[in-house]
């Protein structure tokens, strides 16, 4: 048994979409979340920049004495997982791409036309396609980068015609030309626009990696004996910029659960 918290991080508020599944299934666990809202988006930045930011955040979570780190960001999972594991060899670190790829490979067959959407860095890394094909080489996979979705979501532009137009801009041709029937939301921000996507393309079967990661969290806690043995107080959501939208989103998703919102900004510490 281990009552230390589980650490999650993302470039912003997207990784929050992984947490309700965990809270429902594992109510004893305490969560520390870090959203790098001051430096979002990561998905159009150089990989070396993403690595620097991710190392700072993983070091911070380790200093908070977490028992497990979940990279609640596809962009970081696609580019930095091995580096972070080397840097913190004594803390289990989970990415989000492997568990979801496994689900896609199990759930789909050669008749499906699978679309992966994500940030530019995630799509250019080809991490999803490579992983899925390793599990099931018969699948038909297409991918598209949708770089404007994350900045709009961070601004709170979600249930809005600007978001719907952006979805059509990136996906209309992609979905019709490739006859996509299954769509993988390869960015943890995208579950927040799942309803918009389904309203426009109701035929799609949507696979959401933010919920698929829960099984690999449970497997890790189980195999290493890391489950908490009683409910732990004090979920904490850190952000490098306490934007109004970050706070609103937390209040919306986690109301009535008891939590603290806190500020942590590495760049300010460096310059002061
Ligand atoms: N939520 C992050 C992901 O899953 C978004 C990355 C970004 O900031 O562009 O990739």
Image: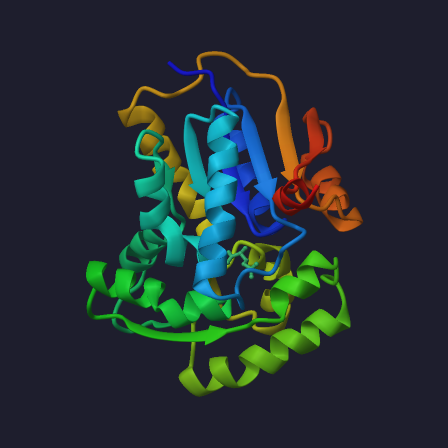
Q: How many marks?
A: 0
Q: Quadrant of residue 247?
A: top right
Residue at 66 percent of width and 44 percent of height: 240
How far across and down, in percent of the image, does residue 184 sit? 44, 63
Up/down of 97 relative to 249, above or below? below
Q: Is residue 25 visible from the viewing direction of this image?
A: no
Q: Residue furthest front?
A: 272
Of residue 241 and residue 4, the one placed in the foreground of this image is 241
Residue at 32 percent of width and 57 percent of height: 107
Up/down of 204 relative to 155, above or below? below
The image quadrant in which ligand 1 is located: bottom right
| Image quarter hosting the C terminus | top right
Residue at 19 percent of width and 68 percent of height: 137
Up/down of 76 relative to 172, above or below? above
Left or right for 40, reference 106: right
Of residue 145 and residue 28, the one placed in the foreground of this image is 145
């Amino acid at each position: 048994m281990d009552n230390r918290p589980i650490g999650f991080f993302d470039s912003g508020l997207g990784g929050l979409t992984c947490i309700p599944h965990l809270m429902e299934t594992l109510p004893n666990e305490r969560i520390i979340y870090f959203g790098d809202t001051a430096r979002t988006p990561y998905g159009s930045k150089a990989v070396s920049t993403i690595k620097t930011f991710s190392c700072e955040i993983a070091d911070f979570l380790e200093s908070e004495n977490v028992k497990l780190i979940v990279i609640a960001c596809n962009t970081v999972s696609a580019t930095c997982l091995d580096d972070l594991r080397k840097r913190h060899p004594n803390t289990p670190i989970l990415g989000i791409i492997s568990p979801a790829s496994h689900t896609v490979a199990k759930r789909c067959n050669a008749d499906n036309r699978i679309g992966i959407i994500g940030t530019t860095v995630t799509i250019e890394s080809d991490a999803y396609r490579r992983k899925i094909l390793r599990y099931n080489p018969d699948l038909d996979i297409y991918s598209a980068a949708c770089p404007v979705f994350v900045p709009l979501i961070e601004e709170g532009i979600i249930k809005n015609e600007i978001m719907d137009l952006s979805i059509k801009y990136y996906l209309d041709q992609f979905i019709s030309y490739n006859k996509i029937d299954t769509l993988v939301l390869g960015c943890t921000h995208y579950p927040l626009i799942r309803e918009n996507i389904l309203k426009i393309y109701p035929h799609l079967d949507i696979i959401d990696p933010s919920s698929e990661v829960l099984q690999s969290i449970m497997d890790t806690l189980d195999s290493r004996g890391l489950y908490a043995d009683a409910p732990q107080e004090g979920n904490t959501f850190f952000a490098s910029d306490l934007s109004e939208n970050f706070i609103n989103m937390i209040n919306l998703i986690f109301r009535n659960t008891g939590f603290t919102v806190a500020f942590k900004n590495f760049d300010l510490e460096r310059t002061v």
